[in-house]
Image (cartoon, coloured by chain):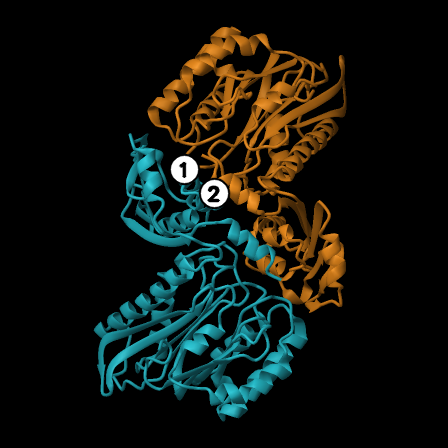
Chain colours: A cyan, B orange
Amino acid sequence: MSVTYPRGFLSAGISAGIKAGNKKDLALVFSEEPAVTAGVSTTNKFKAASLLLSLAHLRQAGEKQAVLLNSGNANAINGREGMAITSRIVSALAQALKIDLPSVLFASTGKIGLLLPEKKIVGALPKLIKNLSQNSAPAARAIMTTDRVPKETVRETGISGRTGMVRIGGMAKGAGMIKPELATMLVVLTTDAVIEKEALQLALREAVNQSFNLITVDDDQSTNDFVVILANGKAANPRIKKETKEFALFQEELTGCCLELARKLVADGEGAHKVMVVKVTGAWSLKDARRVSRRIAGSNLVKTALAGESPNWGRILASAGSCAARMNPQTTTLSLAGTMVFDAGEITAYSEKTIHQALAAPEIEIALDLGIGNFSATAYGCDLTEDYVKINKDYS
Amino acid sequence: MSVTYPRGFLSAGISAGIKAGNKKDLALVFSEEPAVTAGVSTTNKFKAASLLLSLAHLRQAGEKQAVLLNSGNANAINGREGMAITSRIVSALAQALKIDLPSVLFASTGKIGLLLPEKKIVGALPKLIKNLSQNSAPAARAIMTTDRVPKETVRETGISGRTGMVRIGGMAKGAGMIKPELATMLVVLTTDAVIEKEALQLALREAVNQSFNLITVDDDQSTNDFVVILANGKAANPRIKKETKEFALFQEELTGCCLELARKLVADGEGAHKVMVVKVTGAWSLKDARRVSRRIAGSNLVKTALAGESPNWGRILASAGSCAARMNPQTTTLSLAGTMVFDAGEITAYSEKTIHQALAAPEIEIALDLGIGNFSATAYGCDLTEDYVKINKDYS
């Protein structure tokens, strides 16, 4: 259970023939009651047809009730016909579910520049709806593309409602075309909290900033990124409002969910064998701290050094130094995999062998202290291997 | 002949034992007469000791006469001791050449975080000076790191002097850690022009903007990037001043030299098998045009698609759309390797086979028309192959 862990949510995942070989490729998340909904999406100028429709529906007042997702086709950059097909698929789903059209959202992932197989998808909708259940595994699997494993999360908050503790659940897909500064994958989160829409949007934005906006696989930005949360109120708790103790509790758990999914995304980065955790401290501003940590996590040279378990720390500082952020070599200290290699402007007497051995671990910490301020940020990345190249050469 | 093509320039390249296996690793470019000099360097906060010394010397008034270069060691991020060694090496060279200390410049390339082998280099200086000749090949070879071929250029301008036509020559090294928005490699240019210092700096800046600032291999920024031009006046032409016909001629040929070297750099990009030429037209501003063309040339997903000769044009538009630049899908047109695939917001009826065949060529053109303005820019990049990963995993 993940998206179905909060009360009143069902999900399904089936094969609609979008992908070859009878693989699951169509998912539905459904709330028994209309849900307060918030979303965050890519800023790409070439937004997918599915996303454009979802954004239009989100702009309309009223609660949402269903999220349709497909893999195997990004439904992006495919012109007027792509948009028309999208509308017809979503209309068919709304009719079949007997809910208002604007209460349906749609998210797609896969190859860009192709039309969706409309007949196959519309034909599969009855089966999809029939399969709705509390088992979230088929849905989590149906949204996978190059992902090696499904990604799910569940949390219980400390907030009590009449039917029990407020719960949060979520699932995500994403392995490539991942870059920070925006939500960069498909993520569906659910909660049974009773919460104000404005508070929900605020909590989601902050959770995304602290999680999905600080991870990178290849610094490529998708046309389809979409993070959405539905809150159906089934926990029957007193309504959560901004700037309250309950909001802080909800925020903490939602951020926890997003961070867990975000770490699962980088660990499953295309071709990745290692996760890198880049902790930047002592920055002049939060913006500087985030910028530097993301830059290091995104550097192809740092990523390949990591793949080779090479103690080539100079690349880390070169990457940091290329940022438009306040920095001074004389106050900078760097630790790589637990060994301090550079201390306030000077190379330390480190053992290359020790670092090399430590780099064999599956998770590597890079700790950079800029020594000029009080702000910090942690970014997450992965190594760059020959497998990443192979996966993306052969993708289409 | 390249840097020695203009009158009055000599060069040498020898092995000083910085690299293993008796490979050439120390080069000198020497002007018989003091030369008006201009330079452009990396904006990285962790500048190499060699570069810091060169920048200090460039800030001092007076002409320059010698450029020392080494490969096999970046002489970067190596603390106070690194700086002290650098000063002593350059002092030794100035004494041996019997020229003023500030007239010597120094550039290094190789691994970051190591001290230069001072004794070896100082010990090799007499041989280096003895080897000075009009043969530029040893110098061009001695500055190579992961480069597969030396990179040289020569031009004759249409400007007459008493001793003949004004000439320009140059050599460059660079294959990885290459990103735009700054000079991103070591380049030494020479000319026998008589030219004002201000005009020379202006011409260099513009030439770099149109060449080295529009190429990318891996979007990683080096600590050592340095482009320098020495003008020794041996052509005895009337002094070239800004905003004259002669300046325009000089500018054109200097830009030509830089563009030739820049194209040679991307063609020799680490692990690269293909060059991509990204022409962006119809942009709202020059900044937008440059930003979009560079972004596409730097996208890992576009680069791997190119490596796989995959007609996956959606990645090109996704990459363009991720830029902070004015854009509208409905006015956007894209051609890949000679075939229009996207025309004013709609997918064309292109033949995937035709594109796939065209992608077998060693140079691939991506032509993106944004259809909203009159500005254009061309960026140069290369494909991303398993070999890039291999080279950079095993580098240290």
Output the chain of dot 1.
Answer: A
In the rendered view, would you say A249 is above or below A360?
below
Q: List x then y, in percent, for residue A29.
A: 44, 81
Labelled disc at residue B3: none
Q: List x then y, in percent, for residue B244.
A: 71, 29
Q: Is residue A95 at all visible to an observer of this figure? A: yes
- Image quarter of residue B311: bottom right
Residue at screen point 54% across, 92% down: A95
Q: Quadrant of the C terminus of chain B?
A: top left
User: Which residue position is annotated with label 2?
Assistant: A301
Mark 2 near mark 1, Cβ–Cβ under 8 Å?
Answer: yes
Output the chain of dot 2.
Answer: A
Q: Is residue A332 at all visible to an observer of this figure? A: no
Left or right of residue B345: residue B45:
left
Q: Residue furthest front?
A: A21
Q: List x then y, in percent, for residue B271.
A: 59, 41
User: Which residue position is annotated with label 1?
Assistant: A312
The total of numbered circles placed on residues is: 2
Residue at screen point 56% across, 10% down: B129
Which amino acid is tagged 1?
Asn
Left or right of residue A254: residue B44:
right
In the rendered view, would you say A132 is above or below B100?
below
